Amino acid sequence: MIEQSISIERMEQAVNLFGAFDENIRIIEQELEVAVVNRESSLKITGEGENVMLAVKAIQGLLSLSAKGEAIGQQNVRYIIELVRTGNEEKIAQLAGDVICVTAKGRPVKAKTIGQQKYVDSILKNTVTIGVGPAGTGKTYLAVAAAVAAFRDKQVNRIILTRPAVEAGERLGFLPGDLQSKVDPYLRPLYDALFDMLGAETYQKYVERGNIEVAPLAYMRGRTLDDSFIILDEAQNTSREQMKMFLTRMGFNSKAVITGDVTQIDLPADKASGLKEAMRVLRDVEDIEICRLGEADVVRHVIVQRIIKAYEDYENAKNGGKGKK
């Protein structure tokens, strides 16, 4: 057993680090099998030598985030513990990057993981970005934040959000209302993200002016989209023809982000995913980048990470260690 000390300069840093009811410190203690005690202006960490070393690196990383004004929560703690465990603690400095957008309630939107930071950088740098990853990695939310930021900065005149309505056949017919009412349930995640960024009133104002459009993918056929920030969500459920149709809608001074999760394809078994084909066809095309987000980039409840990991392990075991086919 060894003990190490870390000095804390300001009390607010300690409060941010410990979290509500000391939940952050308890995670460090449980994950790294150490004891952390606050004594006056320092923290005392005791435990086995290697565990203490990892805990010190994790706490120092969290304190550096706190010094940059980041609120420390369970997601930050678990992510930084994973970085130090895998010997990637130098990457902690890349976190707490620039604010992408400020929501209607004044909350800054930032990338929370290294993978998310690369994804945001790709969106800013490239004309077309393909973001692929499991649920909860912020693919859609960060893309909408970047779109709103570009719109506010007058880089584009329109935001267009679209996704395929996979069940666009007879099932929609049983829903009440006109066609827009029937497809709205499929577009709800996009509405939610826009409401969060802009507020319901501002969103409605821009919709009426034609600056914002949320529509099923079928509505894109035959159009040329100039001066637009276009987001195609749930792209794993596009057919080959739909994906090619979407990609060829691009006009001058436009940017596109395509998001999807290739483990959640809802197409019939005999129909190939347009997203999977696009990833193969476009991987070497200039000004197009494919960003892969993973389990470590999940920023929802920790149980989501565990669910994703359990499914990955199950698929690997089922396919003899070859992953999902």
Image (spheres, grey):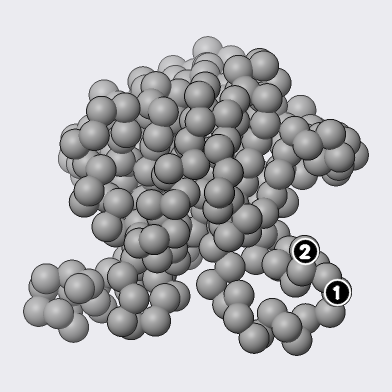
Q: Residue at x 51, y 49 (%)?
A: 232
Residue at mark 1: 177
* Tag 1 and tag 2, C-beta contact below 8 Å: yes
Q: Residue at x 26, y 24 (%)?
A: 90
Q: Quadrant of the N terminus?
A: top left
* Residue 316 appears in the picture as rendered: yes
Secondary element at image label 1: loop
Q: Residue at x 34, y 66 (%)?
A: 273
Instruction: Tell me if residue 77 comes above or below residue 319 in the rendering.
Output: above
Amino acid type, residue under disc 1 in the picture: Gly
Q: Quadrant of the C terminus?
A: bottom left
The x, y position of residue 97, in whole percent, is: 47, 21
Residue 180 shows which numbered tag?
A: 2
The x, y position of residue 313, in whole percent, is: 24, 72
Instruction: Tell me if residue 12 comes above or below residue 281 in the rendering.
Output: above
Question: Would you identify the image quadrant in which residue 210 lies?
Answer: top right
Q: Nearer the viewer, residue 221 or 300?
A: 221
The x, y position of residue 286, in whole percent, is: 25, 28
Gap in Å between the C-alphas at discs 1 and 2?
8 Å
Amino acid type, residue under disc 2 in the picture: Gln
Q: Is residue 7 left or right of residue 103?
A: left
